[in-house]
Amino acid sequence: MDTPPAPVRRPVLWVPSAYLAEGIPFAMVIWVAGTMFKDLGHSDTEITLATASVGIMWSLKPLYAGFLDMFRTKKFWVLAMEFSIAVLLGLMALSLSLPSYFEVIIGLLWLIAFASATQDICIDGIYITSLEKDRQAAWIGWQGAFWVTGRIFATSLVVLLAGSLQTRAGMSGKAAWTLALSVSMGVMAVLGLYNYFMLPTGSIPKRPGGANEIFGTFLEQIVDFLRKPKIAMMLLFVFLYRSGEGFLLVEAPLFMQARLADGGLGLSLENKGLIDGFISTAVSLGGGLAGGAFVSRYGLKRTLVFMALCMNVPHVCYVVLSQLQTPDAPLSFLTIGILVTIEKFGYSFGFVANMLYMMQQISPGKYHMTHYAFCTALMNLVLIPTQASSGWIADAIGYKNFFLFVMIASIPSVIAAWLAPFPNTPGDTPEAPEPERSEAAEAI
């Protein structure tokens, strides 16, 4: 029998650490692995196809999200996955010494992606069942900001360390990446230990009585989700909102790393780590916090199209970089840094709206956590074809034409935001939730 949940600690003690731990493994799979493979001599096409295929794990969440609460607490699954991710990152580091390291690491990335997706489900479940609706909006900026911080840790400190070890310590590429991956393993282990003490348990639903009840509940969760008012248009928004961004997620960092002769920016690992991380940290955190505060003050319905524009218009920064860059006249570090950080601010600012829309318009109801997982799975589904094809498109038409293509691919995101319905107004009361011991009233 599960023990009653402990009182919820103040959000400042667990929201940052929870979403920091959520952002790191996603970034390690989607961005850092690609940077490492590029550094070790693999092509853009090979990298994007391999890493995008792994990303499907985040879209399989609906198939098992509803079962997690039936057996153990949300906190149990979060901790189990965080410690598992730490072990898997350690195995990645060790596997670099193998002749077939690429295939082995891809297999390990699939496992990390599964653990990360499972962690995402339950962290989001804790967030939406431990905080009241107004507090969800107030903390959504911090949630996004620390997820971005996790991404920045991976894409800056880990990459910076790998580059520094090669240039300053004279280590080989594989040896440097082995040590860098080991550091990421240690950070995930420390976060797991911290969350063991600070993370709330989350709501605990009534446990199922047998297999029939389990599968009956799962079927009910799907039916209940599909019966939501205006669900088709809401899901269309979720699917299209990140359409343009999906082409940039993996390919933009590879463009920064690509040789000048190939049309790239020719940044070293150290400079890439600085621009992707330290220089952009303040604007990324500021963008997430500003976006959360902006939506909290003016309302999501009034600001959604504006937020979509803020997320997509800054993609033009990569158009400028690719058009101005030439092998004979490389752009300055300052110019690259300014344009990349503008894009990161816009991404962090606009992304807040996507998460809050799913949290407050689609997922409320009897199966809040499970339905939110359905939404995030669909959101990530668009990233699979866009990421998988981005490397092939860039290789085929060149970086200059590729980023012009991205601007066109961003248009559906803004149209979807314009057409997005709002069936849940602030005064609506969702249907009664499943029987549970809620901690939300105790949140401070």
Image: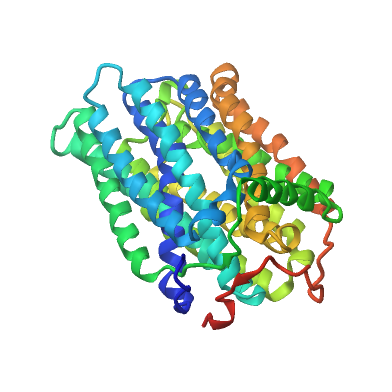
For the point 26% across and 28% down, the residue is: 95
Residue 420 in sight here: yes
Q: Image quarter for residue 318?
A: top right
Where does the image place residue 345, in percent across and percent down from the top left?
Answer: 54, 56
Image: 435 above or below 51: below
Q: Image quarter for residue 363?
A: bottom right
Where does the image place residue 77, in percent across and percent down from the top left?
Answer: 45, 54
Where does the image place residue 333, in percent across and percent down from the top left?
Answer: 38, 44
Where does the image place residue 408, in percent across and percent down from the top left?
Answer: 72, 35
- Figure coloring: rainbow
For the point 63% across and 44% down, the residue is: 62
For the point 33% across and 28% down, the residue is: 39
416 displayed left or right of 402:
right
Q: Image quarter for residue 380?
A: top right
For the point 81% across and 66% down, the residue is: 424
Residue that sits furthest to the left in the current view: 169
Image: 255 above or below 356: above
Number of marks in the image? 0
Residue 270 in sight here: no
Image: 103 above or below 166: above
Q: Nearer the viewer, residue 224 or 250?
A: 224
Q: Nearer the viewer, residue 441 or 421?
A: 441
